[in-house]
Image (cartoon, helix red, strand yellow):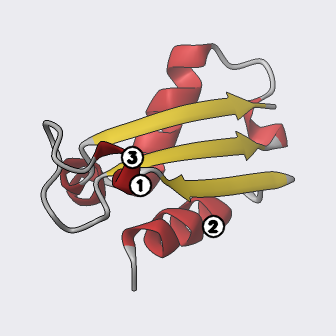
Amino acid sequence: MSRADDIRIKLEAAFQPTQLEVRNDSARHSGHAGDDGSGESHFHVTLRAPAFQGQSRIARHRAVHAALGPELVREIHALALDIDG
């Protein structure tokens, strides 16, 4: 399973989103710092879920990181998050 699939599965299970897009941007960063050669180091996530209503930006980001788990977060060099309720 790819990291993008793993991200998608974990976020769907944790937040039941109304919108979820997981985009692998790793090719755009090939040869840059943090490129581990796997082709799965840089991601952009757009996530809309009622669970985020009333939460601060920091609380939303913490919730996403908790849902992904420390192991997966360590494997990703860059994770851009666009999150809203």
- Identify the image quadrant of the N terminus: bottom left
Q: Residue at coordinates 76% horizontally, 59% vertically from top-left?
A: 16
Secondary element under disc 1, as helix, strand or loop, is helix
* Amino acid type, label 3: Arg
Q: Which residue is mark 2?
A: 13
Q: Earlier in the sequence, mark 1 or mark 3?
A: 3
* Residue at mark 3 to residue at mark 2: CA–CA distance: 29 Å
Q: Which residue is mark 3?
A: 28
Nearest to the observer: residue 1 or residue 70 = 1
Outermost residue to the bottom: 1
Nearest to the observer: residue 75 or residue 13 = 75
Q: Which residue is mark 1?
A: 68
Mark 3 or 2, closer to the camera: 3
Residue 52, quarter of the rendered image: top right
* Residue at mark 1 to residue at mark 3: CA–CA distance: 23 Å
- Left or right of residue 2, residue 22 in this image: right
Q: Are marks 3 and 2 in contact (CB under 8 Å)?
A: no
Query: In x, y percent, where is residue 62?
Result: 45, 31
* Amino acid type, label 2: Ala
60 versus 51 height, above or below: above
Callout 2: few (<14), some (14-19), or many (20+) C-alpha neighbours within 10 Å?
few
